[in-house]
Image: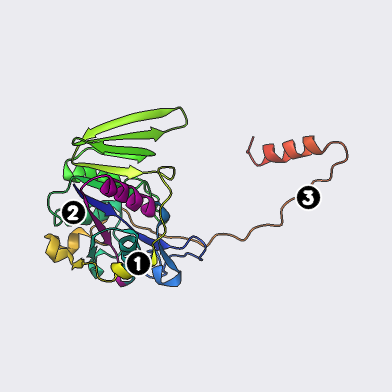
């Protein structure tokens, strides 16, 4: 089985994140960068499938030079090889333009059976990449999977919702996005970290994918940030003295804030 796992390097959620004053895109250089945690779960799920049978796992990402760190971490977990789309032209791409790039890059990996991804990245939070890729590739997409099994050319997933559990099923090839409950990702071993340094990473530009600069980046995006303002500082809050009527005062405050 040929499995592609989409990963993304994102700003560490503990870092101060901001938009650049120039083109109003995410200022990635101003914060620490990490492999998105939900992507680790997608990698883990691919490795479980590999260990249960015969499979090859390819990591795929689109990003700047330092996305290599995220690729190496995924490889150190046990993936076999990687494809890195690294081109200045993709800077500022929205979800649709990014999906175009990733769909083309998936086409360079050969006859892919399964694409795994996280349900949403912690920076963009569109939560739509799996669906967009399914549309562009002409494949079914099973989203927000908390359980996954792949057998006899069929992917079966369970999706938990507030109302219950949905059973999803699709013939391969398919795109599956995973949720936080699907597994606990493994830590890379020292042996895995050393082995990752020797695993092949193919670097591609958009011309290698048959794309033009006008189709990606800010020029090819349907969504752009027009303006933004810094988050206002937190106020000191309102202190409520309980003189036997504390509950009523709290309720009155919440009503005033339109919270109840």
Q: How many marks?
A: 3
Q: Position of residue 129 (x, y in %)?
A: 30, 48
In contact (CB < 8 Å): disc 2 and disc 3: no
Q: What residue do we see at 12% from left, 49% from top?
A: 111
* Residue position marked by numbered label 1 in the rendering: 191
Label 1: state its secondary structure.
helix
N-terminal label among 3 and 1: 1
* Residue position marked by numbered label 2 in the rendering: 106
N-terminal label among 2 and 3: 2
Q: Is residue 68 above or below residue 145?
A: below
Visible residue check, residue 22: yes
Q: Position of residue 70 (x, y in %)?
A: 35, 64
N-terminal label among 2 and 1: 2
34 or 26, nearer to the observer: 34
* Residue position marked by numbered label 3 in the rendering: 239
Residue 11's tag is none
Q: Give, as a single range, the part of the protein colored magenta.
A: 39-65
């Amino acid at each position: 089985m040929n499995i592609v796992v989409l990963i993304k390097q994102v700003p560490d959620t503990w870092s101060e994140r901001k938009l650049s004053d120039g083109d109003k895109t995410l200022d990635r250089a101003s914060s620490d960068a990490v492999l998105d945690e939900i992507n680790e779960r997608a990698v883990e799920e691919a490795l479980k499938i590999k260990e249960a049978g015969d499979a090859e796992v390819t990591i795929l990402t689109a990003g700047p030079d330092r996305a290599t760190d995220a690729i190496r971490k995924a490889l150190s977990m046990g993936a076999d090889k990687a494809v890195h789309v690294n081109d200045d032209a993709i800077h500022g791409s929205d979800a649709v333009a990014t999906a175009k790039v990733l769909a083309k890059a998936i086409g360079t990996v050969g006859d892919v059976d399964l694409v795994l991804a996280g349900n949403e990245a912690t920076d963009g939070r569109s939560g739509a990449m799996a669906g967009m890729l399914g549309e562009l590739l002409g494949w079914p997409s099973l989203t927000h999977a908390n359980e996954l099994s792949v057998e006899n050319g069929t992917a079966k997933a369970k999706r938990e919702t507030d109302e219950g559990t949905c059973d999803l099923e699709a013939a391969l090839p398919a795109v599956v996005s995973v949720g936080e409950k699907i597994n606990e990702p493994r830590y890379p071993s020292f042996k895995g970290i050393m082995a990752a340094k020797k695993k092949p990473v193919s670097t591609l530009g958009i011309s290698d994918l048959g794309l033009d600069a006008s189709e990606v980046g800010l020029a090819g995006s349907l969504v752009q940030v027009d303006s933004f303002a810094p988050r206002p500082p937190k106020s000191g809050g309102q202190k409520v003295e309980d003189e036997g009527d504390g509950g009523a005062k709290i309720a009155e405050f919440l009503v005033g804030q339109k919270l109840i």
